Image (cartoon, grey):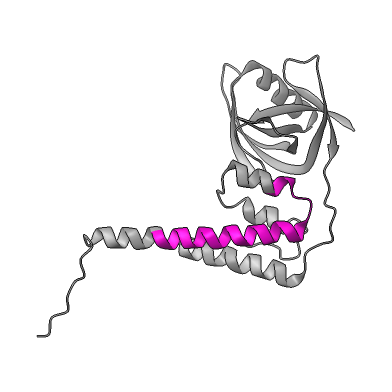
Amino acid sequence: MSELGLFPLGIVLLPTERVPLHIFEPRYKELIGECLDSQGEFGLVLADDEGLRAVGTRAAVTDVLHRFPDGRLQIVVEGGERFRLVRMTSGRSFQTAEVEPLEDEDADAADDERERALELYGRLTAAAGSEPDELDADSSSLSFEIAARIDFGAELKQRLLETRSEPERLETLAGLLEQAEQAVAAERERAEHASTNGKVSPLYER
């Protein structure tokens, strides 16, 4: 176990995911400053109506986009290993806790499970009119790499984060991707319908 400084937020950071953060509170300016000085990590944990969740992600600062004169920072962080909170500790201006790694229990996913997830990811991006990122089909964290590129919302991302099986995560992700593709297609159909006021343009012969 190790002690880790915590940054509770209303978002979930998945392993391999990169997100921008605006650091303005003094306690978190202190936390991030120490991480920058030591090239260390902090723990990003979802905090919502249910309180502080028990599973979070180690985060490392990859870019400092801007330093303000008053000490505020605009940074980009990347998700690393998952951890479980063991015991809250005290003594710092920011929250700290003893944590332990959260590792998968099941074997790696089969090739067909990976291929299905990649196919659904490609179909979703095509439906949304964008190009899919190139992903390593052999990655042990493929589920996280795909989920990190889609806004599923904090609750669903936390569910994936806490799942200790890559095959199970890919199965859950496949269902989410299918639902998202259907939602994008339905929204596009509604937009096309609205643009014609619900009318069908007749074809006239000349």
Check the image and name the residue furthest to the front.
Answer: 50
Name the residue: 67% across, 54% down.
145
The reply to whether the magenta stretch includes residue 165 is: yes
Location of residue 56 with respect to 164 vertically, above or below? above
What x and y, as percent, mark residue 178? 55, 63
- Image coordinates of residue 175 in percent, x first then y, are 60, 61
Is residue 66 or residue 112 the one in the foreground? 112
**Residue 111 sits in quarter:** bottom right
Residue farthest to the left, as pictured: 206
Q: Is residue 92 above or below residue 107?
A: above
Q: Using the rendered image of the protein, determine whether residue 98 is visible from the camera's viewpoint.
A: yes
Magenta stretch, residue numbers:
160-186
Q: Answer whether residue 120 is magenta in the image.
A: no
Count of labels in the image: 0
Residue at 61% over, 19% down? 25
Depth check: give the residue in front, 79 or 153: 153
Vertically, is 170 above or below 19?
Answer: below
Q: Quadrant of the N terminus?
A: top right
Residue 79 quadrant: top right
Left or right of 10, for residue 139: right
| Residue 196 position by quadrant | bottom left
Helix, strand or loop: magenta stretch: helix
Residue 46 location (% of width, % of height): 66, 34
**Along the viewing direction, whichever of 54 and 132 lies nearer the viewer:** 54
Residue at 47% from the left image edge and 64% from the top image edge: 127
Residue at x 32% of width, y 58% of height: 191
Residue 202 lies left or right of residue 108; in this view the side is: left
Res. 16 visible in picture = no
Q: Residue furthest bottom?
A: 206
Quarter of the C terminus within the rendering: bottom left
